[in-house]
């Protein structure tokens, strides 16, 4: 009988000590909460231009984006330069030596459509990157006052875009650079600057 009591007392003390150790270990474990991101959408009004031709070679348009941790955006831009009058000459863009073409005197017409991905670094900072397609036609105003059309037709081109969206409450703004395959990368000219401001909901 005495042995049974001693054995029961020993088991009781052992189990109690074990439970205290397990309880102590449990209290020391910290579970890291997984970061959550709020879903956001916005519509932005955009303006894009070549730095030295803000009025003659500009684009305006709209961007829509939807993002949680990752997201997407779509953008449509149209030219505001326009084509002024009917061209009398056709210029080969790679052989235009017989024409005097002022760098500031041209008008461009066309549209750009593009889209890409967004990543949310914080609830306010969202870098983005995308690809686009451009269809465009350009008239140059020559030294004699007459017009010449570059290539004589609408041209096709692709572009790359990268930038960052900043969102503060219901206000969203963006700043980015756009590089066109034929202009920026083949002819090594500066990329276009694209800015935007809009409403987040």
Image: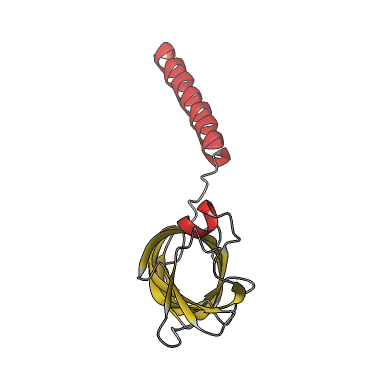
Location of the N terminus (image quadrant): top left
Name the residue: 56% across, 65% down.
Answer: 176
Quarter of the rendering containing residue 51: bottom right
For this view, does 168 lie left or right of residue 7? right
**Picture layout, residue 62 above or below residue 66:** below
Q: Is residue 19 above or below residue 11?
A: below
Task: Spot the residue most to the right.
Answer: 52
The answer to whether one can see residue 96 in this image is yes
Nearer the observer, 127 or 50:
50
Looking at the rendered structure, the number of numbered marks drawn on it comes to: 0
**Residue 43 quadrant:** bottom left
Q: Position of residue 34 (x, y in %)?
A: 48, 51
Query: Residue 112's x, y, as percent?
Result: 40, 70
Q: Is residue 169 above or below residue 130?
A: below
Q: Is residue 187 left or right of residue 84?
A: right
Q: Residue 152 at what x, y percent from top left? A: 37, 71
- In the picture as drawn, the residue positioned furthest to the bottom comes out as 85
Q: Position of residue 93 (x, y in %)?
A: 48, 62
Quarter of the image where the C terminus is located: bottom left
């Amino acid at each position: 009988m005495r042995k049974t009591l001693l054995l029961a007392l020993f088991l009781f003390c052992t189990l109690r000590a074990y439970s205290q150790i397990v309880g102590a270990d449990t209290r020391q474990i910290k579970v890291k909460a997984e970061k959550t991101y709020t879903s956001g959408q916005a519509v932005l009004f955009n303006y894009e231009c070549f730095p030295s031709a803000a009025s003659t070679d500009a684009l305006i348009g709209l961007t829509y984006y939807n993002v949680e941790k990752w997201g997407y955006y779509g953008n449509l831009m149209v030219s505001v330069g326009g084509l002024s009058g009917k061209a009398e000459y056709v210029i080969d863009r790679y052989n235009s030596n017989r024409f005097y073409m002022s760098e500031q005197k041209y008008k461009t017409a066309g549209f750009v459509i593009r889209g890409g991905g967004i990543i949310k670094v914080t609830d306010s900072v969202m870098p983005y990157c995308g690809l686009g397609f451009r269809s465009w036609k350009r008239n140059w105003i020559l030294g004699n006052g007459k017009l010449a059309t570059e290539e004589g037709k609408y041209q096709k081109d692709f572009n790359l875009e990268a930038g960052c969206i900043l969102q503060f409450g219901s206000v969203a703004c963006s700043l980015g650079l756009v590089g066109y395959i034929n202009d920026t990368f083949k002819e090594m000219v500066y990329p276009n600057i694209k800015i935007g401001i809009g409403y987040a909901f």
